[in-house]
Amino acid sequence: MPLSQGSKPTACLALADGTLFYGRGFGATGVTEAELCFNTAMTGYQEIMTDPSYAGQIVTFTFPHIGNVGVNPEDDETADPVAAGMVVKWDPTEPSNWRSAGELGDWLAARGRIAIGGIDTRRLTRAIRARGAPHAALAHDPDGNFDVEALVARARSFAGLVGLDLAKDVTCAQSYRWDEMRWAWPDGFARQENARHKVVAIDYGAKRNILRCLASAGCDVTVLPATATAEEVLAHEPAGVFLSNGPGDPAATGKYAVPMIRDVLDKTDLPVFGICLGHQMLALALGGTTVKMNHGHHGANHPVKDLETGKVEITSMNHGFAVDSQSLPEGVKETHVSLFDGSNCGIRMTERPVFSVQYHPEASPGPQDSFYLFERFVASMDEQLEKAS
């Protein structure tokens, strides 16, 4: 709800152009600065806040009912929130859901994340769409004392995401195996005990539900850090290589990721599947380029057209950079495009089982139209195994 007349704001959102938004703070106290984006999803705020792809960003939620179903440990996509902060229209209400294990404000406070409520998110979203994702500073002080000039200065001092490699900040510290499958009623998360193929997943900021989807599709998954070399990948003798989602500028992460991918492609004919930042890494490795978008795609309602089948999928997206389809070389085909703005959403090599998509087929949150891509990855490994036998 908006601030009532005469009430003192306890949080302030300052944009680099000097625009100020006052509201009520919840979660942790303090100040943080980051790029400001908006997300149009109507559910899944906990998954969004814990998605490593949001490193370096404050998320504005366009849907007003944020916090209404509480929080629970099963919905975390990584151990702690990665997004720098949260902006909402209405203060979180008392949670009403049988799965709730706590309240959003308490969850944010315990994890050091600042949030602001009572904001005109419609106005803020229009400003982001018109002028691009701004740099912003978000402050929460229960006493309502704000140094506005200092906040604007902090927003202006934020370096931005261009040229910034954030994958190294959110990747795993060492390799590990993953066998947990997707949640299913009534037993929750089962374990994969009959995997058909060994897969190495490169963690640029992998969501847990992506790894669960790989396991559910029949994969024995070993996760390696973003900086893994081709030799380290191939030492596991995988049947396929997966490239995960992640944050930051793909060109910056590509300085070490692209050589690894090229080495794997040069030395083997293994199937390769990439999602989000992994899609951009593959495109760079194949000779393409990436560009910074005006405000990116963040939501769970993005229509994407499969150019090879004509099918339209409603997808979940979270990216501020995109592959330039005009830069794709011969032998690399554009397979999917956004029906919102025509931007690239998928590629594949024409002669090899190597493909990737910009969107999130694991959803979490979002529709499940695109789970078939995990099955396609497994089918490509089946085919390679048959050829070798």
Image (spheres, grey):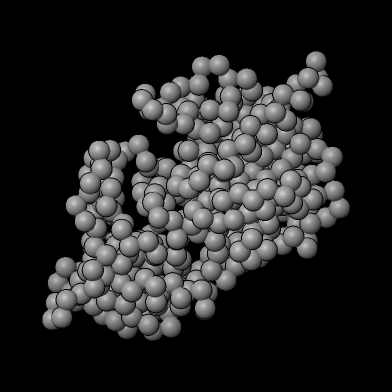
Q: Is residue 72 above or below residue 184?
A: below
Q: Is residue 310 left or right of residue 136?
A: right
Give residue 203's quadrant in the image: top right
Q: Residue at x 46, y 78 (%)?
A: 127
In-front residue for pair 266/377: 377
* Residue 8 appearing in the image: no
Q: Position of residue 309 (x, y in %)?
A: 74, 46
Q: Is residue 129 above or below residue 102?
A: below
Image quarter in which the C terminus is found: top right
Q: Residue at x 72, y 30 (%)?
A: 380
Q: Position of residue 68 (x, y in %)?
A: 27, 52
Q: Is residue 124 left or right of residue 382?
A: left
Q: Is residue 82 left or right of residue 117?
A: right
Q: Position of residue 339 (x, y in %)?
A: 64, 60
Q: Is residue 118 above or below residue 307?
A: below
The total number of labels drawn is 0
Give residue 195's quadrant in the image: top right
Q: Position of residue 364 (x, y in %)?
A: 46, 44
* Residue 12 appearing in the image: yes
In-front residue for pair 170/357: 357
Q: Is residue 385 above or below residue 158?
A: above
Q: Residue at x 78, y 32 (%)?
A: 268
Image quarter in which the N terminus is found: bottom left
In-front residue for pair 8/299: 299
Q: Residue at x 55, y 47 (%)?
A: 360
